[in-house]
Amino acid sequence: MSIHQTVSIIGAGAWGTTLACMIAQKGHKVKIWAYKTETCDDINRFRENREFLAGIAVPANVCASGDLDFVLSGSRFVILSSPSHTLRPLLKKISPLISDKNDFISVIKGIEEKNFMTVSEIVAEEFESIPGLEKIRNKIAVVSGPNLAREIAAGLPSTTVVAARSKKLREDAQQLLSTERFRAYTSEDVAGLEFGGSLKNIMAIGAGICDGLNYGDNTKSAFLTRALREMVMIGELKGARRETFYGLSGVGDLFATSFSKFSRNRSFGEKIALGMSRSQAEGAITGVAEGVHTARAAYLFGKKEKLEFPVINEIYKIIYDEKEPAESVMALMTRTLKGELE
């Protein structure tokens, strides 16, 4: 990997902008795609993303544009940082502009609703027919961990995990992302990172519901422990390694997202518990609470496979069926008694 290079980032939310700042501070040229003209103007003229990352200075070697052709030209690494539900249409626009010279890094923590596909699977499906990209799965890295953008942008010490099938790719991505205050580890478990990072968003909504109901630390700790069990169950069914869920991209991410005041998913759950509707809660937070979409995806997956995920099912009912949160808690507490590990 060359000392200084051009890096493309697709998505100028809080996380995409944070990564742009970090990478640019290492001397690389960063081109970031934003769908709003106002966001591009903010970054290019005022060196700040006032909507998603207010107060953080954007380096001069970051350029924002709504032109995908411009953003993608001249780069090896393409970092995908858009909301998961907008990804597939974006990939269709990107596909004529990429080649076998590109490698992809997904920092998206979401699952496609209709078919329960992860981001790396979606990228592979969209790009594997492009000449030279028949082995696209070896050119995709994923990043996940306790990565609250606001804290990382402020320079607080943080860690993450980079997973890829290719040893060279994951090590190159590790080098690209690591700084003195942001340490990246590597893993081979792509599925583990993607399912851990995505499913924890559902559970963070549940943690926020606990907060909104003014339940104590015992309740929240018990909830998260049982929630982790369902994350592991789904992950293993989809080919992930159990141990990955007990690392930074599993437990680490779950704890950070479930306790932080900066967490969109936790905040969404708290607002739901305080009486807001789904649309009201979504409108009251900046950015996308990925757990809202992932809750439906996981719920439908469980129904299709005839599997029981009590925590996920109740969170789904609260979000989509407007079930009273306190009733869902009671439903979980009064289930048939059993052994802890059954």
Image: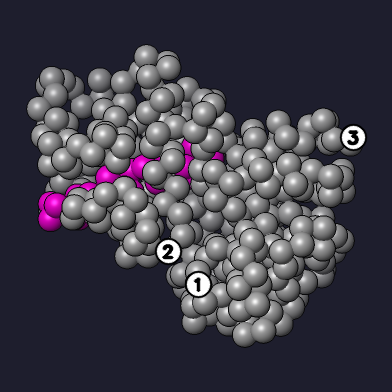
Do callouts 1 and 2 mark residues in contact (Cβ within 8 Å)?
yes
Whether residue 168 sits left or right of residue 295 in the image: it is right
Q: Residue 305 placed where, x, y %?
A: 42, 16
Query: Quick one: label 1, few (<14), some, or many (20+) residues within 10 Å?
Result: some
**Residue 330 seen:** yes
Hey, which quadrant is residue 294 in on the image?
top left
Q: Which residues are magenta?
A: 193-215
Residue drawn at the location 66% of the way across and 43% of the way down: 89
Q: Which mark is residue 51?
A: 1
The amino acid type, in three-letter code, at marker 3 is: Pro
Residue located beneath label 2 in the image: 286
The amino acid type, in three-letter code, at marker 2 is: Thr
Residue located beneath label 3 in the image: 131
First along the sequence among labels 2 and 3: 3
- CA gap, disc 3 to disc 1? 39 Å
Q: Residue 296 placed where, x, y %?
A: 40, 34
Q: Residue furthest right?
A: 131
- CA gap, disc 1 to disc 2? 8 Å
First along the sequence among labels 3 and 1: 1
